[in-house]
Image: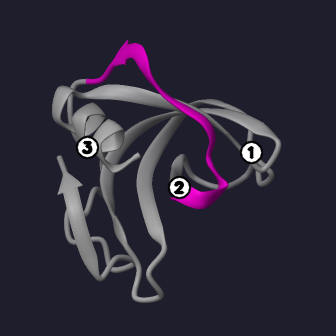
Amino acid sequence: MQSLICEAINSRHCVEFGYDDHHRVVEPHVFGESRAGNQLLRGYQVAGGSVSQDEPPWRLFSADKMIGLQTSERTFQGTRPLYNPDDPAMETIYCHL
């Protein structure tokens, strides 16, 4: 999983996966590990559903809840507004834009 997400970040390809019973298409920005040892992805959701429709498109995903993770053909240009490469949710950052 780490290599797939880091390659998607490096090549600026979206990733797609199921999460909380919704299909997601996400621009991955930061992938790392929390203090508790959970792998996390911070991304900007560009398509698909969510439990909270009112939230902004920035989302934090727990890797262990992602189903069917794959790289998308869809690409993106770069960082989105409010991007933070030093994501405070992660103690260790594996890769980022």
57 to 25, vertically: above or below: below
Q: Which residue is mark 1?
A: 50
* Viewer-side residue, 74 vs 37: 37
Q: Residue at x 49, y 27 (%)?
A: 70
CA separation, marks 2 and 1? Answer: 10 Å
Between discs 2 and 3, the one toward the N terminus: 3
Sort mark 3 into few (<14), some (14-19) or many (20+) by Cα contacts within 10 Å.
many
At which x and y percent is residue 1? 41, 46
* Viewer-side residue, 48 vs 20: 20
Most extreme residue toward the bottom is 35
Q: Residue at x 22, y 25 (%)?
A: 77
Magenta range? 60-76
Badge 2 amino acid: Arg
At which x and y percent is residue 58? 49, 52
Q: Which residue is mark 2?
A: 59
Numbered disc 3: secondary structure: helix
Q: Quadrant of residue 65?
A: bottom right
Between discs 2 and 1, the one toward the N terminus: 1
At which x and y percent is residue 90? 34, 76
Q: Are marks 2 and 1 in contact (CB under 8 Å)?
A: yes
Numbered disc 2: secondary structure: strand
Badge 1 amino acid: Ser
Sort mark 1 into few (<14), some (14-19) or many (20+) by Cα contacts within 10 Å.
some
Q: Which residue is mark 3?
A: 6
At which x and y percent is residue 17? 60, 34
Q: Quadrant of residue 95?
A: bottom left
54 to 46, vertically: above or below: below
